[in-house]
Amino acid sequence: MVRKKAEHHECLLGPLEEIALHQENIEKIEFLQDWCPKLKILLMQSNLIAKIENLNKLKHLNYLNLALNNIEIVENLERCESLQKLDLTLNFIGEIVSIESLIGNYNLENLYLTGNPCTDFDNYRDFVIATLPQLISLDGREIERSDRIKALQNLPVIRSDILFEQENYRYQRKAQKSRLENDIQRKWDNEYKDMDPDERNKKFWAEKCEHAPEVRYEIEHMRQLKLKSYEPQPKEEEKRGYKYFATDGRPFNINQPKIDFLFNDSEPDKYELDLAIYKYLDTSLLEIDVQPNYVRVIIRGKIFQLHLPDEVDISNSTAQRSQITGHLVVTMPKAHVIVDKKEPKIRKSKLKSAQLYHQHTMEDCATHTEQTKREYLEIGPSDNILDLTKMIETKTMRTNIEQKLTLSAKTPSSDFIDDPNVPDLI
């Protein structure tokens, strides 16, 4: 806040000579004498400051404005030798004798105490004029030489009267403070506790109140509540609940970190999961859990879970991470692997048949078949094999049958009579 107020000085605090911190709800003066040692003008009016403190190192301070605060005693300004103007308007200074601490501030010329309880004391002005002879004006009124002479002549009597009135005020202030604190606490615990905010504001500002530091604190508290009610309330994000398993125990597929992955199930005896883990993510932030029917990887508290088609051997599963890309590869051997021993032979015969088809003609293939009587050409699936040997043997048998069935002309018998009405056979 202090640096922001120094925008006119390029936000540099060391050489800063003037700063305005009014209406910032400041309750305590601190750090300024260390951050801004060259301050000449300090404006802190309209805050909630209850005590003058932490200003001893400001040797160049000329003007200090602490009007409209909750100050009750003038103190801790003895070492501000350059102080010329001090404004304490509308505070709660009843200990008027405390201004004697300003006697050593020989450059002090202007003092404002208007609106403080001490101004109601008899001979208040004469006491201040006689106590601080370096003053030129008090509460905006110039001090005449005759006023100072008169005040100095009657100072012993005036001071005794001031002490008496101050003691009466101290007793009244102590009773007032205790009463107000109890009343305010009781009001907020009972009456205002369950009241509607609009009705509470309306009733609070309609009530009469005393002029006291406790009331100022309550007013500021009510003002902050009113401002807070105007601010839009941030919506709480609903945390999504993840279910890891279905009612029948089947694991769900979950990608909570929204990470890319590749699942390879082309190998007959194993599964491979390739997770695109962030390259610079520490491996200690990863948790890997392989179960018979699912694999789970927790990445910085976010869950990645994948259901496996078949059961895997968890004891022989491995996980490796690439040092170059950062990817995580989980290899999971299958628990039950079925090996088909006939499959390789069929594939070999198919390859051999294709070679024979391209190297020989149909006649060479038939000749080759007659010689070996064992090799054959596969066309189509293994369960539908065309045997050329049988094909050729069937053709030979058909030829022999056709030859046997060929009819030759027979010589008619001696008693055969040819009927001219019967047509010849074709």
Image: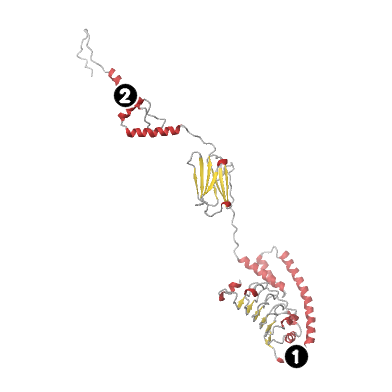
Residue 98 on image: x %, y %: 74, 80
Specify the farthest residue to the front: 323
Q: Amino acid at mark 1?
A: Lys
Q: Could you say which quadrant of the image residue 184 lies in?
A: bottom right
Disc 1, SS: helix
- In the rendered view, tell whether residue 330 sits above or below residue 12: above
| The disc label shown at residue 395, or none | 2
Label 2 neighbour load within 10 Å: few <14, some 14-19, many 20+: few
Which residue sits at x=79%, y=81%?
A: 163
**What's the CA distance linking mark 2 and mark 1?**
156 Å
Q: Which one is nearer the viewer's eye here, 89 or 310?
A: 310
Quadrant in which the N terminus is drawn: bottom right
Sequence-earlier tag: 2 or 1: 1
- In the rendered view, tell whether residue 398 sits above or below residue 3: above
Residue 171 on image: x %, y %: 79, 76
Q: Which one is nearer the viewer's eye here, 395 or 119?
A: 395
Residue 293 on image: x %, y %: 56, 41
Which residue sits at x=66%, y=65%?
A: 197
Q: Which one is nearer the viewer's eye here, 180 or 6?
A: 6
Residue 305 on image: x %, y %: 55, 47
Specify the farthest residue to the left: 420
Disc 2, SS: helix
Task: Say which residue label 1 marks.
Answer: 150
